[in-house]
Amino acid sequence: MLINASHLDYVALNESIRKTDENCELIGCLGQRYIAAGMAQRSIRIDGVPGNALGAYLNGATITVYGNAQDAVGDTMNDGRIIVHGNVGDAVGYAMRSGEIFVKGNAGYRAGIHMKEYRDKVPVMVIGGVAGSFLGEYQAGGKIIVLGLGRASRPIISNFPCTGMHGGKVYLRSDCRDVLFPDQVTVRSTTDEDLADIFKYVSEYCNLFGYDVAQVMNAAFTVVTPNSNNPYKQMYVAN
Amino acid sequence: MRIEYVYPEFEVVRNEARCIQCRVCERQCANEVHSFDPDTGLMLSDESKCVNCQRCVALCPTRALKIVKSDCALRENANWPQGLIKEIYKQANSGGVLLSSMGNPNPLPVYWDKILINASQVTNPSIDPLREPMETRVFLGKKPAKVERDEGDGLKCTLAPQLTLAMPVMFSAMSYGSISYNAHESLARAADALGIYYNTGEGGLHEDFYRYGQNTIVQVASGRFGVHKDYLAAGAAIEIKMGQGAKPGIGGHLPGAKIVGDISRTRMISEGTDAISPAPHHDIYSIEDLRQLVYSLKEATEYKKPIIVKVAAVHNIAAIAGGIARSGADIIAIDGFRGGTGAAPTRIRDNVGIPIEPALAAVDQRLREEGIRNQTSLVVGGSIRSAADVVKAIALGADACYIATAALLALGCHLCRSCHTGKCNWGIATQRPDLVKRLNPDIGSERLIRLMTAWKHEIMELMGGMGINSIESLRGNRLMLRGVNLNEKELEILGISHAGE
């Protein structure tokens, strides 16, 4: 179903998406929030710029944005897929538990914070460009992959990455000599096994956005893992 | 003695003449205080492990046991009370942050005890709740500012979603993980039978309890544990936890050792991984950001459920509540500094936050002054200990109260304040199967139902005494309250007169 969003506020827009069971194509989207919140088993195509909390609590739907997206994309996402042909704002994939997010360009602050995993639910986020500060803060599971394409001399991620990380992995397409990590994580070069681990997602990224996967993979990668599942274990004394 | 030695706080007194060496105490104590000495045929005790939970006392068939506070004391010092000195020793021994459980036990003012309730004499006669109808039902949610009519002159009856409570009390948030499966089941079943609500806390909702969804408030905290579409859809309302009275400004942290089996499944995180809920929601730095979370939850549940925002009572609570009301929240829950907890740093629990009584009075007053009191309901907790506290809270401006410690007491809690050890002998704050089964949900839910039924009757009697037959006429009716032993500033903030005025 084609929905012209240009004269709809978010309540009306989201209601019109909910009313139909069909796949939707939104045109003229301009900042409407909460699009497809909690939705399952649908495909939603968006032309324009969706507002904050796009695909919050997403439960299986596929969202493709032909433009940039704003803050809190895929907040507490449980399943599904979000593909953004542009940049995203802050806190993309906050506490996501499963599903996939592909961002062609850059991400703002706090990408992938609180990302978790549970049994067969392992979320993956691929950011094609660079990511802002606090990437993967409190990460407890899942995979965050940052490719740094077109970053020139900029560092691949900004300050304070992986603080409080206690699960999951962060893969960075860089030697990361210009990045400062906290003590509670281990930072090392990738092994063949690590690269095999992410190949599927990087090639999917390349398929989606028209890159050559061999070229993208042909670079130094760094992997970050936590030192402990229980970073605060020794902190307390019973009173 | 060794420098790190801390003398035990309690003594186990065993009446040897009564003790029949049945070893019940030994089997009942998860702390392993009691043991049997086969050589002498006598029961022994290691009082250093005793937390004074009274389990052995209650179960001893011959009443041979009592637990008393040790009289082995350090030299008295008003500036250095014993507790403080022992805390210094513990920290010097371990280098750890002191961790405590349940509410602030310190002798700080309890304003409820300084507020007295009115009764009718001669004029405006009192009402006997045994003979006359009394309305204790309350509705929580946004109320319209004015009556509106449609074109046909009919009333516009579309209301924002409301929670309907048979009495103005609900069980407040305690996560599955901090308390046991059987404790949750007791609360859920009691809430269902009573026509009130219980609250999942931030640990998700066990699949067995989805059937109590009509009487369940599901919580969303910064860690978002167990939060997904079905969970949001299951509850009657959704509570965003911004803060907790026992530990304002800090987050939650369930150690990985407790994330096993069902707890892991319900929180939807891997076994053995710490469950960390940081103090702030890292996507909320303003009222506008809060509004975003409130409305994302409304959108995800199609505007069918009220959204509660829970905060701890802190210094500028009136201004904060004003902001929350404008964020679109349907209900504001405020938790006072005496609220309980399964574990909190002692220094935070005992020193951070403010009492619920002035916080409630200030919030109700501010929302009225700003003309937005109808936009949200107010629920208060931390700590509400009796039907009298409930009546006083409502007269100060609350729509309903949250209780948790009182509910746990009904389930058998003896307030030993050792929840953080995970070895609760009463089967409440533990996940050990042998301990959990000590709490029978049939009995637990019955006890909760009896407690709430008794409170409901007391609430009706107190209302009847004032000549009031509906909670609606009591709410914010501060003329029904008088203060004793309160200074002018306290009376001013509480908005009540002194006794005799």
Image (cartoon, helix red, strand yellow):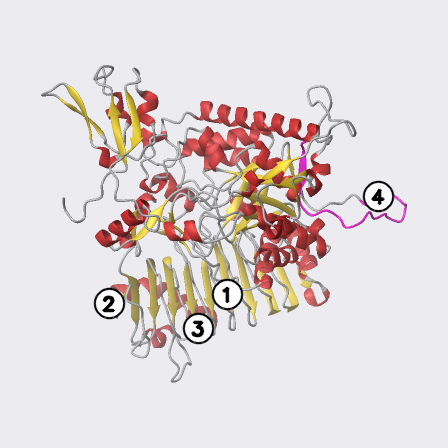
Tag of residue A230: none
The answer to whether residue B7 is above or below residue A82 is: above
Tag of residue A132: 3
Check disc 4 and report the residue beneath it. Answer: B155
Do discs 3 and 1 belong to a common subunit? yes
Mark 2 or mark 3, whichever is nearer to me? 3
- The residue sitting at the bottom extreme is A153
Q: Mark 1 or mark 2, which is nearer the start of the sequence? A: 1
* Chain of the residue that carries numbered disc 1 in the rendered image: A
Residue B141 within the segment the image draws in magenta? yes
The secondary element bearing badge 2 is classed as loop
The secondary element bearing badge 4 is classed as loop
Do discs 2 and 3 belong to a common subunit? yes
What residue do we see at 49% from left, 55% from top? A77
The answer to whether residue B60 is above or below residue B420 is: above
The reply to whether the C-beta atoms of the residues labelled 1 and 4 are less than 8 Å apart is no
Question: Mark 4 belongs to which amino acid?
Answer: Leu
Check disc 2 and report the residue beneath it. Answer: A191
The secondary element bearing badge 1 is classed as strand
